[in-house]
Amino acid sequence: MPATLTIDLPAIAANWRSLATAHGGPTAAVVKADAYGLGAAVVAPFLHAAGASFFFVATLGEALALRPFLPGPPIAVLNGFEAAEAGAYTTHRLLPVLGSLPQITAYQAFAASQGRKLEALLHIDTGMNRLGLSAAELDIVAADRALLKGIMWRYAMTHLVSAEAPADAINARQRAAFAAACGRLPPMPRSLANSSGIFLGADFRSDLARPGAALYGINPTPQAVNPMRTVLRLTAPVLQLRDIGAGEGVGYNATWIAQRPTRVATVALGYADGYHRSAARGATPAFAGAPACAGTFDGARLPLIGRISMDLTTFDATDHPTLRPGDQIELIGPAIPPDEVADWAGTNGYEVLTSLRHRATRVYVGHAAQAPGR
């Protein structure tokens, strides 16, 4: 009896429409990392049916895997361009995001060999210091705009560093730096806001927003109530119930000791399924004060006890006498959103979602239906 991951496609589409409305302009969908672990081959076509017309992935491999399921709209590859892979971009109509002078030069040479202009996006770094034209490269390009010839630039883009923290001054600095950089280059449409950036206000609107995590229910405004709908529910069956006495331990290294007679529910889910081992910190004395983790059954929380192991997790079911083997415990879902699990594990909701493994049986709500709202 494996775990079940139920993915609500209409909720993902509703989140995209909500983000597009909040942005007030064209809004793409970021479906990298297999749509944040939820299945890009299913999620992306549903979003396209709902109205999304531009998509982003991280790698060329992701783009090639997605293209058969998304034959029409543009797919942009965020991680850049390598000359050895050039043919795949034209064969499959993919757009590289170019973030350095060597990449631009290589893509220009490839375009020249094809005898035509090719489309791409230009990535300008304004503070992330990962990918994108550096300040020195921007100076070179601004001084010689011919360095950008031979390419049809769909968008200039940058990536916000701290958009989830609206009071962080770096947001305004990045917005101003991006505007200044674009003003030094040939005119082209601009792409600025990510999920959280959409909620920074009208100053962060652009020709294309690029939400990712918020599509999948991660809170883009951590200081406020989550404006996004929950899109998934991870449940796992109870394999066995057993009664133990006070003083007995549960799980590896007996890190949890019963303080009373306790009924232990063992559930068929563990870190091999992507349920983070570190989420049990609150059930370990070494992490006293860490948030207490739990599952839910019949609307009530069951405290997680002991260590999370590879295939199994244990819960205190003492106060839930109706629980039986085969009943489903909810690990992530409307009652326990991914962001809360992330707090337990000392990570973020992005990692929680992208860690979910394909061992769980996947059920897609709305898969056979046309996405509403087109």
Image (spheres, grey):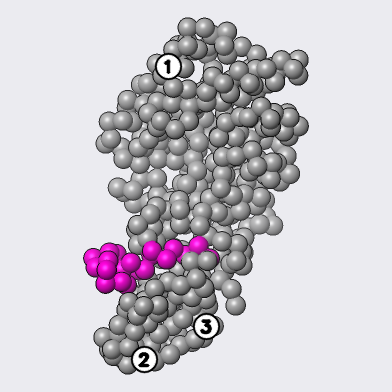
Left or right placement of residue 92 versus residue 49 in this view: right
Give percent across and percent down for residue 74.
65, 33
Specify whether residue 279 is painted magenta. yes
- Cβ atoms at labels 1 and 2 below 8 Å apart: no
Q: Which residue is mark 2?
A: 244
- Residue 190, above or below 307: above
Q: Which residues are magenta?
A: 273-293
Give the CA distance from mark 3 to mark 1. Answer: 60 Å
Q: Residue at (63%, 43%) from the top-left corner?
A: 62
Q: Amino acid at mark 1?
A: Ala
Which of the marked residues, 1 or 2, is nearer the chain's N terminus? 1
Query: In front: 28, or 360?
Result: 360
Quadrant where the N terminus sits is: bottom right
Q: Nearer the viewer, mark 1 or mark 2?
A: 1
Tag 2: amino acid: Ile
* Location of residue 183 in the rendering, given as x and y in whole percent from the top left corner: 44, 13
The answer to whether residue 73 is seen in the rendering is: yes
Which residue has dot 1 on it?
Answer: 136
Q: The disc labelled 3 sits on which kind of residue? A: Leu
Tell me, for residue 239, which label it has, or none: 3
- For marks 3 and 2 on the same chain, the one whose residue lies earlier in the sequence: 3
Q: Quadrant of residue 331?
A: bottom left
Measuring from the top left, give residue 133's x and y in whole percent: 47, 22
* Mark toward the viewer: 3 or 1: 1
Give me the residue at 42% from left, 53% from top.
Answer: 349
Q: Is the residue 307 above or below the residue 27 in the image?
A: below
